[in-house]
Each structure stands twice: as structure tokens, then as C-alpha cells.
Image: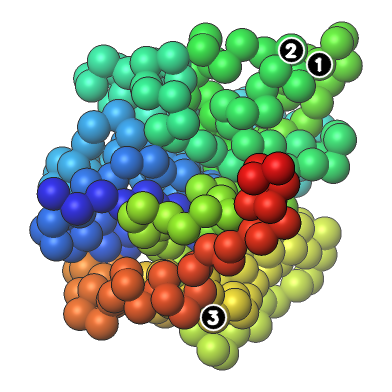
Amino acid sequence: MLKCDAVFAGGGVKGIAFIGAIRETEERGYQFQRVAGTSAGSIMAALLAAGYSGKEMEGLLEELSFPAFLQADWIGRLPGIGKPLNILFRNGMYNTAGLEQWIRDKLIKKGIWSFDDLPEGKLKIIASDITNGRIMIIPDDLPFYGLDPAQFPIARAVRMSCSIPYFFQPVMINQNKKKVVVVDGGLLSNYPIWIFDSKQTPRWPTFGFRLKGADRYQPMKISGPFSMFKAIFTTMMEAHDRRHIEDHDAIRTVFISVENIRATDFHLTLEQKQKLVRLGREEAKRFFDQWSFSNYISRYRRAPVNIKSKSQKGD
């Protein structure tokens, strides 16, 4: 069995395509050791860390109802003005309690609840702390907020990572009696491919899974404050997909081109979801057909000999 680490980028509902890529990776003989993710990628990472296979994850598609995650309170349900009022007073149209509950239920079926239920370092989830202006790596950074990593619910971490600004209400945590506002990890690091890297030559590869948007962006109509807010977070999500990454990261990245679906198209049919899975699998096949770990190491990760350190050690 081959070993690998994996990092999953954000991308909203388009992240379903990662399931197909995961299946292909597993069928190539790889076993995931450590996993990390941002936003939608955090969902994939959490399920993998809990022990779900790509095949099992594909089986969840029929019960995966994104509209059920769009929970609004009585204000949000007011015709016409509800969603703008929720943005104004609650900093987001919907809360993500439904998503957190769904993730919790799936993890519990595998006997997983908190980070203490996983091997140390198995799972890392990225969120954005906009109060302190810093990337949040969960569980590593939890002590900074006075939180115990061992007791912190994984589903809550996923919820934090998936809280798209304006669309979903942010998650609040208390830090020394001060409220800290946490939103979607993609705001600060949508593709944390660096997270498992070290100065040493790696023993096995870290594969990245990243969505690639269309070259041409379909303009959005902006007719007022509400449509402007929608355009802001849609632009934020879609722009990440077109961002350039360096060659040394691109060579270990499975790029999945998804067109005609936006990150916030929450009303996908089962057929559309299955098409995304097939697309992810096809792109992963193309990637692995040309992948060479030895080539990657020789070109980008050959650890240089630290002559000074060796000399000092000899003294």
C-alpha cells in the first residue's frame, strides 16, 4: 500500500468533484495518512480522517441535501427583506447549524467526535479569524484561544471553515472574555498545500486537490446592496479557482475544471452531483498517469546538505 498526504482546497458545492478524485487515488493503491482542507475541502478531509472511503462518500450523495443546510431564523424567512436583514443584524443570511449536525452524525457513525479521537496530526482544518487577522489551523491553534484541542468537536471546526462571509453567519468563540469572529478558511488560505511540508525530503507525496474555474467569468447583475453582497462573496469564492500557483505545487496538484456551476449553487440535482464525481475521477486519472514521485523529489524537494550544521555537529 502506497502512502500519501492530501490537501483539499475550498470551492463550495463544486467540491463534490473531490470525491471522484479520492476514489481514483485510492484505486491507485494510495492510503491517506494525513489530510487537511479549507471550506468544502474540510468536509472531505474530515470524512477521510474519520475512516470514510471514497466509495462510501459517493454513497452519501443521495442524502446530501445542500438546501437543508440553508437554515434561516424567523427574520431570514421574511419575504423580500429577511435575507438582507440577516446580513445586517447577524452578519450572514443563513446559519450553518444544519451542516455541523450532518457532519457530526457522519463522524459519530465512525466513532469519531473530537480531535482526540484521531491520531495526532491526522487532520488539520483551516479557518479565518477576522478578529485577530490570522489564519486558524485547527486543532493546532486552539490553545491560543484557550480551547482544548482534545475536546474540540471536529464538526464545529468544519462549520467554522465553511462559513462563507455574508452567505453564512460566522462562528463566534470566546477568547479571554473577548468574542472572536471566525469565517471561511478560504478567505485567508483557500489552498493550504504547504501545511505538511518540512525542510526534509518527504517520505511520501502530499497531493493537492484543487478546483479550476472557467477562464471567462459570467458577469453578475448588481442592482442594490443585497446583490452587491452576493457578488462580493461569489467573486471571493470563484477568484480562488483562477489563482496561479507555483510550479513546485502545480506538479503535485490534481486540477479539476468545473464550469457552469458556481460555488454557491446549492440546488444541484443528483445527476449534477454524480457528474461532478465523474469529472473529478477523470482529472485524477490524467494526473496519476503522468505522476512520478521520484521526478518531483529530484526537481523540487531534494534536501540540500547543511554543511555548517554538519561541521558544528562534528566539533
Earlier in the chain: of badge 3 and badge 1, it is 1
Amino acid type shown at disc 1? Gln
For mark 2, does the 10 Å Cα neighbourhood hold few (<14), some (14 to 19), or many (20 or more) residues?
A: few
Q: Give the colouring mode of the picture.
A: rainbow
Residue 27 appearing in the image = yes
Q: Residue furthest front?
A: 315
Q: Position of residue 138 (x, y in %)?
A: 59, 31
Q: Amino acid at mark 2?
A: Gly
Label 3, secondary structure: give it.
helix
Which is nearer the eye, 145 or 77?
145
Q: Which residue lies at the image location 74% right of the left edge and 12% below the top edge? A: 146
Disc 1 packing (10 Å; few <14; some 14–19; many ≥20): few
Q: Which three-letter amino acid code belongs to the residue tagged 3?
A: Asp
Residue 97 in sight here? no
Pick whichever, 121 or 216, lies toward us: 121
For the residues labelled 2 and 1, the Cα–Cα distance comes to 6 Å
Residue at mark 3 to residue at mark 1: CA–CA distance: 39 Å
Residue beneath the point at 23% across and 21% down: 110
The disc at residue 247 is 3
Residue located beneath label 1 in the image: 175
Q: In the rendered structure, are the residues bearing label 2 and label 1 in contact, judged by CB atoms less than 8 Å apart?
A: yes
Residue in the foreground of this view, choosing between 279 and 314: 314
- The residue wearing badge 2 is 146
Q: Quadrant of residue 34?
A: top left
Where, quadrant-wise, is the C terminus in this rendering? top right
Closest to the observer: 132 or 294?
Answer: 294
Percent from the top left, x then y, of residue 252? 41, 70
